[in-house]
Image (cartoon, helix red, strand yellow):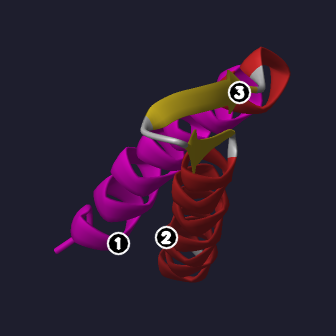
Amino acid sequence: MKTGIGIILIAGALFLGYLGVTGLQESSKAVNILGIELRAEDQGAKETSYVQLGLALVALVGGVYLVGNKKK
């Protein structure tokens, strides 16, 4: 039972990590006009991405613990 929950947590961590990384990459845009770079950033999207990455890390640690903690 614990191993199944651990695998689900690891899969969820991978999904949240993917969402967090793509969110960070898409949170800022830049345009070059006549040698001048104009940049716009979405702070709300960045904060959401950091939260997703943090939750992914917690889920990954929990999943690895549950999968690796087998009773002998």
Give the label on residue 38, or none: none
State the count of labels. Answer: 3
Labels 2 and 1: the sequence-earlier one: 2
Give the label on residue 67, or none: 1
Label 3 to label 2: alpha-carbon separation:
34 Å
Q: Element type at marker 2?
A: helix
Which is more foreground, mark 3 or mark 2?
A: 3
In the rendered structure, does residue 20 fall within the stretch colored magenta?
no
Name which residue lies at 63% across and 76% down: 8
Which is more foreground, mark 2 or mark 1?
A: 2
Q: Is residue 63 above or below residue 23?
A: below
Q: Element type at marker 1?
A: helix
Give the percent coordinates (x, y) of residue 68.
23, 68
Q: Is residue 49 above or below residue 70?
A: above
Quadrant containing the C terminus is bottom left
Q: Which residues are magenta?
A: 47-72
Which is more foreground, mark 1 or mark 3?
A: 3
| Residues tagged 2 and 1 counted as in contact (Cβ below 8 A) | yes
Q: Which amino acid type is marked by label 2?
A: Ile
Q: Which amino acid type is marked by label 3?
A: Ala
What residue is shown with label 3? 40
Q: Element type at marker 3?
A: strand
Q: Residue furthest right?
A: 44
Q: Which amino acid type is marked by label 1?
A: Val
